[in-house]
């Protein structure tokens, strides 16, 4: 996922989603004015980037993550035949 360098990932509360506003770089911790959660600036930004990645879609609009495919329940032997069914 690509996020623009000017996206406010460190200004948006990762708990409630409220944009708390710009802060100088020397402010490393801040408290959300809406929900009261105390955030580390970098950790909060990382959570927001991770959340954005989970919402991403491919260029053609399909979900990024493929559907779950269950593994086969029988083990395959070394010659491509299921174990126990080899011709003797």
Image (cartoon, grey):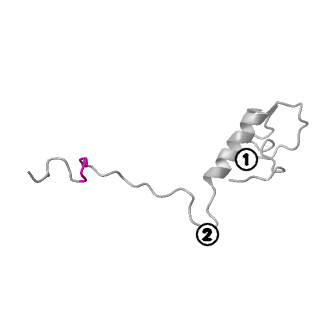
Q: Nearer the viewer, residue 64 or 19?
A: 64
**In this picture, residue 61 sits left or right of residue 78:** right
Q: What residue does disc 1 label?
A: 17
Q: Are marks 2 and 1 in contact (CB under 8 Å)?
A: no
The x, y position of residue 29, in whole percent, is: 81, 30
Whether 79 is among the magenta residues is yes
User: Magenta part of the protein: which range?
Assistant: 76-80
* Residue extending furthest toward the bottom: 60
- Dot 2 surroundings within 10 Å: few (below 14), some, or many (20 or more)? few
Residue at the spot x=79%, y=41% of the render?
10
Q: Nearer the viewer, residue 79 or 19?
A: 79
Q: Main secondary structure of the magenta part?
A: loop
For marks 2 and 1, the one nearer the N-term is: 1
Mark nearest the camera among 2 and 1 is 2
The x, y position of residue 77, in whole percent, is: 23, 47
SS at mark 1? loop
SS at mark 2? loop
- Dot 1 surroundings within 10 Å: few (below 14), some, or many (20 or more)? few
Q: Specify the quadrant of the image occupied by residue 11.
A: top right
Residue at the spot x=43%, y=54% of the render?
68
- Cα separation, mark 2 vs mark 1, equals 27 Å
Residue at the spot x=14%, y=51% of the render?
86
The x, y position of residue 6, in whole percent, is: 84, 50
Q: Specify the quadrant of the image occupied by residue 50.
A: top right
Q: What residue does disc 2 label?
A: 60
* Residue extending furthest toward the left: 88
**In this picture, residue 26 sits left or right of residue 62:** right
């Amino acid at each position: 996922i690509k996020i623009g360098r000017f996206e406010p990932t460190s200004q948006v509360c990762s708990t409630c989603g409220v944009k708390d506003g710009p802060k100088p770089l020397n402010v490393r911790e801040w408290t959300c004015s809406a929900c009261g959660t105390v955030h580390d600036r970098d950790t909060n930004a990382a959570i927001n980037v991770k959340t954005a990645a989970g919402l991403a879609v491919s260029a053609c609009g399909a979900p990024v993550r493929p559907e779950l495919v269950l593994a086969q329940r029988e083990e395959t032997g070394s010659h491509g035949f299921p174990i126990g069914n080899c011709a003797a």
